[in-house]
Image (cartoon, grey):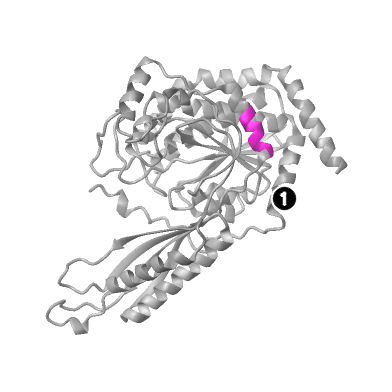
Amino acid sequence: MKQTLLIALVLMLWQPVYSQEPNHENFIVRQLDSKTEQYSKIAREIWENPELGYLEFTSSKILIEELQAAGFDVETGVAGLPTSFVATYDRGGPVIGFLAEYDALPGLSQDAVPFRMELVEGGNGHGCGHNLFGTAAVASGVALKDWISENNLNATIKIFGTPAEEGGAGKAFMVRDGLFEGVDAVINWHPSDRNAANASTCTAVMQGYFKFRGQTAHAAGSPERGRSALDGVEAMNIMVNMMREHVDQESRIHYVITNGGMAANVVPDYAVVEYMVRHPDVKEVKDIWQRVIKAAEGAALGTGTQVEVELVSGIYGLLPNETLAKTMHKNLTAVGGVEYDEEEIAFAKKLQESLNLPKVPPLSVAKEIQPYKLTHFPASTDVGDVSYVTPTVGLGTATWVPGTAAHTWQATAADGMSIGYKGMMVAAKTMALTGKDLILNPLLIQEAKKEFEERLDGYVYEALIGDIDPPLDFRKAQNKVK
């Protein structure tokens, strides 16, 4: 109790002392302001070369070269992931990590214009802003490295290049390989349509393919000789849909048939359905996933087929850390939001016409900082696995026009122009300043670790992916343009 009160007192007293010494903050902000054009070009280059998960060879190379030029030692291809990397600037002291993502999404090709215009028909696009995500992480790390060097401080910066966030669980494999061991705190961000630095939770998820195999036959001439793999898939889907009535209301179960046969008059001997199961509680996710497997096995038994389960990914929900989140919120408030110029206002107003919202948010939302709070969102991120092995914090900034949803062409459009770049630099400054606070105030790290242990409450992390190999080919078929 005495130690907790002492830490709290030091944290209270630290804020006004820090505010009387603005040199550190000014140096970092100036460094980033001076390189805004440079980082905008990098973000645009990655945006122009949208690559799917585990195929981000050009994108990762761009970031690696930037980090090497800045004086980082870079190890590539870690955890068996060809497009991953860990960049390190080592001067001892506390170890601060930054996460960089750079994978794109299939089917979201879009020009940087406020109306629908594909650049490549059916092509990939950065509809989640990972071209900005990775670039800002590099920018933050480089700025913090320059500040450490300028002030002759003892601290270590690690930037983790994490591929395949969109379904491939790249970070889970990196966590499983122990790459985050010894890291005192991890900082990350994500593009959004508003500015917020909250302590957040989200859903854990398990994802995989159910591959049914049967027997071909002429669908009209000799149907009795066939055993339809598609029947197996459909029977499974029916049973899982019945199961929805008997799972916790916070559960999410989604599926898509990725292979349903080739011709209607041929009984298909092969069919595949992809499933994703989500819930805020990782234990509940494991339980529901096993029930889905049982449904698949029952479907195979009933249709005279066989089924193979291929786990693709499994990731944890976020473990929040309010100690870090409140520090980040302070810095985001100091940095401020995104201000549009006249050209950007015209772009934003035109784009908002396509959102089909009953009430369109005012553009002023991009400038505002949302009040701090503890939040939950029902989607998932492999940052969750990182948050279960070291204190982790994140924020969102207004890289998208207010009202824009993720994974849309509207998001892709903003991610490739100045609105996206401005939000990216807000994130870069906020993250770098938060890293600076952790380095200057070791008690802040100590308090964050204390909260981390309290929230774990004895839980021992065990990767949901088990011992499977990384699914390096899971996006290759989608990488082919239609």
In the rendered image, the residue lying farthest to the top is: 342
Q: Residue 168: x, y in percent?
A: 45, 53
Question: Can I make out residue 322 in this image?
Answer: yes
Q: Quadrant of the N terminus?
A: top right
Mark 1 sits on what residue? 453
Q: Is residue 324 magenta?
A: yes
In the rendered image, the residue lying farthest to the right is: 2
Q: Residue 26: x, y in percent?
A: 63, 17
Q: What is the count of numbered marks?
A: 1
Q: Residue at the location (64% across, 51% down)? A: 389
Left/right of residue 196 with respect to residue 274 in the rendered view: right
| Magenta span main SS | helix
**Of 463 and 221, the residue lying toward us:** 221
Q: For residue 232, which quarter of the picture?
A: bottom left
Q: Residue 326: x, y in percent?
A: 66, 34
Q: For residue 115, which quarter of the picture?
A: top left
Left/right of residue 249 with respect to residue 59 in the rendered view: right
Q: Is residue 42 magenta?
A: no
Q: Is residue 73 above or below residue 296?
A: above
Segment tinted magenta in the rendering: 323-330
Badge 1 amino acid: Glu
Q: Residues within 10 Å of mark 1 (few under 14, many from 20)?
A: some
**Mark 1 element type:** helix
**Of 119 and 401, the residue lying toward us:** 401
In the rendered image, the residue lying farthest to the left is: 221
Q: Is residue 238 above or below residue 48?
A: below
Q: Residue 207: x, y in percent?
A: 45, 59
Question: Can I make out residue 145 in this image?
Answer: no
Q: Is residue 227 above or below residue 195?
A: below
